[in-house]
Image: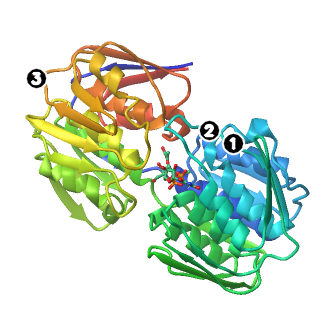
Amino acid sequence: MDIWHIRGGQRLEGISFVQGSKNASLPILAASILIPLRCELHNVPKLRDVDAALRILRHLGCRAEQWGNEVYIDSTTLSGSSIPHQLMEEMRSSVIFMGALIARCGEARLSLPGGCQLGRRPIDLHLDALHRMGAEIEEDGAEISCRVSKLHGADILLRYPSVGATENAMLAACGGKGETVIHGAAREPEIEALQEFLRTIGAEVSGAGSETIRIGGMRPQDHAVQRIIPDRIVASTIACAAAATGGHVELRGIDSKHFSTVLHFLNKAGCDIINNNRSVSIRSDGRLRAIGEVVTEPYPGFPTDAQPVLMAALLRAQGKTVIRETIFENRFRQVPELRRLGADIRCSGRTAEIQGVDFLHGTALTATDLRGGAAMIVAGLAAEGETVICDAGHVTRGYESFDLCLRALGADIYLEY
Ligand code: EPU
């Protein structure tokens, strides 16, 4: 059990280099098995989810090692196409190995992904996309088998811009004969990062970042090097912590476009935001105001992953903010815990109303999920007295050395393992 100890009330101040993105790393790790390849990935965060993906790669017969933030993979030795349940259940995004395995091996066998507390998270869009490319899919309880004699290009229409389904379709399409066009694709920066990697390994892909992605042929390379983009949700979390504590933080190495909606709302709440080339500074005088209504949406809208941390930043803002969560049905799990700090939040279905209070008082909390746990840390930093958060490993799934990162900015926080 991880235990976060926070003594609130310190302003965050200083410069922070934002870690590499978890959600960009995971599909690229899966993509490394598309063809026999040796690849080096730089700026990969050291996280439990990344470690789970590396263990899947090793189980499939690849060499996969991480030293610091460098990852080396040799997928020339791939020898399997099935992933056991224990590895699948460690993280939901293991499902993107399905598209890569079917492209390389013509078959994939895995169980339904685990690791989710955010609500129902079906994979019908993933399966439909693979089916359109010729894959035959059999579901037997929690086991899924996909098999294809020859994948073919297809026109795929996603009725919702699912990030994972877009990634799975892109990966499978790399092994298909003929062109695949994905309509209604997700437009997140992580999709563009995947496109860049696929191009590096020889795939003809275009359109990532728009609603239509085209994948043509592949001229396989045997070596690739790629740097992982900075994590826009970690950047958003540090920005919210600076806002909540009346701090002044400069985030380096991050593209402000990737979290512009978060910066927009922090600015509306009263923070000064200064955008330089690949650095953003957030300055708050600690007296935030409510910001009306925030609605989570697929990119380029306001990200659901930043919703809990923005909520935490606004607990002491003057007035009432309404947050509507449209992506996941169960993403207010942090609310009962935040109330224990003295927050005034009312929830009804997918809407939460936050009425700002004058002060928060530290207490003992339990982290509910990755971003919910991060929200509790943000709130704890702004609360008076000590907050202790018992965390069954949620926050370290997505934040690398977060205690050290915050301590370097002046926070009084330490993580007991
Ligand atoms: N959905 C379906 N059918 C599908 C797939 C998705 O109905 O086949 C629905 C989901 O139930 C959900 C919505 O579509 O309501 C969005 O799901 P999406 O597939 O876009 O999400 P994901 O690929 O499972 C990724 C991130 C999440 C992030 C979401 C939304 C990774 C590894 N995960 O998940 O990140 O919240 O996109 O932006 O990229 C996190 O990092 O904390 C996290 C949960």
The mark that comes first in sequence, 3 or 2, is: 2
* Element type at mark 2: helix
Residue at the image position 48 percent from the left and 32 percent from the top:
369
Residue 38 is left or right of residue 197, and the answer is right
- Percent from the top left, x then y, of residue 149? 88, 73
- Percent from the top left, x then y, of residue 62? 83, 55
Q: Quadrant of the N terminus?
A: top right
Give the residue pinned by disc 1. Answer: 52
Give the residue pinned by disc 2. Answer: 48
Quarter occupied by residue 386: top left
Position of residue 286 relative to residue 190, above or below, is: above
Q: Are marks 1 and 2 in contact (CB under 8 Å)?
A: yes
3D distance between C-alphas at marks 3 and 2: 37 Å
Position of residue 176 relative to residue 49, above or below, is: below
* Element type at mark 1: helix
3D distance between C-alphas at marks 1 and 2: 6 Å
Q: Are marks 3 and 1 in contact (CB under 8 Å)?
A: no
- Percent from the top left, x then y, of residue 238? 33, 42
Residue at the image position 42 percent from the left and 23 percent from the top:
414
